Image (cartoon, rainbow, N blue to C red):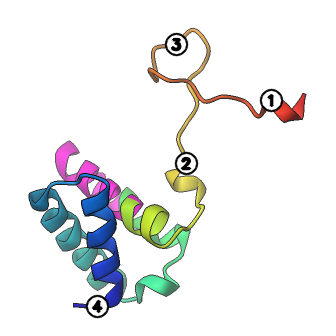
Amino acid sequence: MTPLRQQMIRYMTLAGVSESSQNIYIGNIRTFLRHIKTPPEQVTEQQVTDYLLFRQRSSRGTFTTYRAALNFLFRDTLSRPWALFQKKCAIPGSFASPTPCRMNESAF
């Protein structure tokens, strides 16, 4: 088992991700890396975006688990601050998000 996979599993365990979900995420990451033929350390945000667009043709559940797995690897494990995995703010007055993003108060 690679150190990166061990680290991701450790972080998923600490985050409370169930063992069955961890197995699905690891499988999804393996499938993704085989598809793009690039080591995880060299993957670009554009490659992940393109792959997720490709995966959108899958069922909603399949797409959601791929996005969650990629999010966990690149945002949580590799600490990549990509816009792709940033939370979207709700439009005031909409029901898009139960917790709207807060604006940076120091900007005022």
- Decide whether residue 70 is among the magenta residues: yes
What quarter of the picture does the N terminus occupy? bottom left
Viewer-proximal residue among 41 and 9? 9
| Residue 59 pos. (x, y %) | 17, 47
> What is the C-alpha distance between the residues marked 3 and 2?
19 Å
Tag 3: amino acid: Ser
> What is the C-alpha distance between the residues marked 1 and 3?
22 Å
Viewer-proximal residue among 59 and 8? 8
Q: Main secondary structure of the magenta part?
A: helix
- Mark 4 secondary-structure assignment: loop
Q: Which mark is residue 92?
A: none
Viewer-proximal residue among 64 and 20? 20
Q: Which residues are magenta?
A: 54-71
- Mark 1 secondary-structure assignment: helix
* Residue beneath disc 3: 94
Q: Which mark is residue 86?
A: 2
The first of marks 1 and 4 along the sequence is 4
Relative to 58, say whether 104 is above or below.
Answer: above
* Residue beneath disc 4: 2
> What is the C-alpha distance between the residues marked 1 and 2?
19 Å
What quarter of the picture does the C terminus occupy? top right
